[in-house]
Amino acid sequence: MKKIKETLDYINSKTNNLDAELAIILGSGLGCFCDDLDGIRIKYDEIPHFGESSVKGHKGELLFCEIEGKNCIIMQGRFHYYEGNSLATTTYPIKIFKKLGIKTLFITNAAGATHQKLNVGDIMLMTDHINFMGTNPLIGKNDESLGERFPDMSNCYTKSLQELAKKCANELNIDLKEGVYLATTGPSYETAAEVRAFKMLGADVVGMSSVPEAIVSNYLKINTVGFSTVTNYATGVSENKLNHQEVIDVGKVAGEKLSKLIKLMIKEI
Ligand code: HPA
């Protein structure tokens, strides 16, 4: 609690106690979302207790700005478990955003498809997830003032926001796919056998993030919506070898579509 207060005091000193309505976590290749946005920028490494993001293609900065008349917090770059962060650090920003007043969280990520019904460059609405990380961000003593010990997960990805996403995609002529995201810890990509197994378990895409964030967001009773940009076929689904640069490059193209979709949703929330 003392840590949270110090983080909040620092942010509030920079933003003049701004009340935020929603937050957006930008995944790989989604930096373009901020291209035409102005606001207050705060680097993660200057915020007390906030952690540092070290992944190529991730900026490591919070942007406080207005979109469609609503106060938004944009996280340009997230904290991953595979960077050596605890899941508490990975999800700490969400606890801070809740204290800053957000009601809605947009989670975005880059992911690999487990089958060819999805195409590289597609955007997939996350209808649910499979936590294959072997751990959970809520492990440890529970603070009842934040949320319940055993949170229900049946509406983790808020149904009404899923409906809104589909309606907005339709208006924008975006072919929005839907599916289940499975998270591993990474950082190695999956083996072909793992991808076959994950597909049998019901996963449409695989990635290395988002699930801890969604678990904590649901725990804090924040309305949550998640999108994956399909940056590649997961190992064994096609002939190609995986590389991080390809993930970033494809992510950028899909990212432009996704940016439009999120901005329209913000207008209509
Ligand atoms: N696997 C895991 N994480 C990913 C992938 C993948 O194929 N593509 C982008 N992030």
Image (tube, helix red, strand yellow):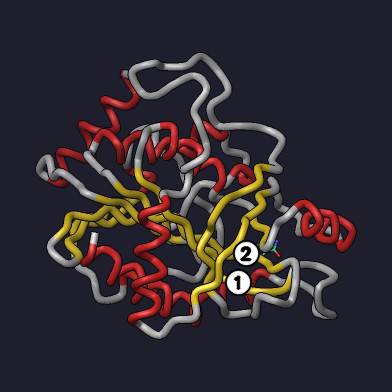
Q: Which mark is residue 195?
A: none
Whether ligand 1 has any atom under 8 Å from the Cβ at mark 2 is answered as yes
Q: Is residue 66 above or below residue 229?
A: above
Q: Position of residue 127 (x, y in %)?
A: 54, 56
**What is the three-letter code of the residue carrying label 2?**
Ala
Q: Is residue 248 left or right of residue 243?
A: left
Q: Is residue 55 above or below residue 212?
A: below
Q: Crowding near pointer 2: few (<14 within 10 Å), some, many (20+)?
A: many
Residue at 17% across, 61% down: 66
Q: Is residue 38 left or right of residue 178?
A: left
Q: Which residue is mark 2?
A: 111
Residue at 36% across, 50% down: 105
**What is the three-letter code of the residue carrying label 1?**
Val
Q: Which residue is mark 1?
A: 230
Element assignment for label 2: strand
Residue at 32% across, 27% down: 4
Residue sitting nearer the eye, 254 or 202 = 202
Q: Position of residue 266 (x, y in %)?
A: 26, 63
Residue sitting nearer the eye, 245 or 45 = 245
Q: Crowding near pointer 1: few (<14 within 10 Å), some, many (20+)?
A: many
Element assignment for label 1: strand
Q: Position of residue 123 (x, y in %)?
A: 52, 72
Kindly report the distance in space between the C-alpha atoms of the residues bearing marks 1 and 2: 5 Å
Q: Is disc 1 in contact with disc 2, using a CB cutoff of under 8 Å?
A: yes
Residue sitting nearer the eye, 261 or 37 = 261
Residue sitting nearer the eye, 162 or 84 = 162
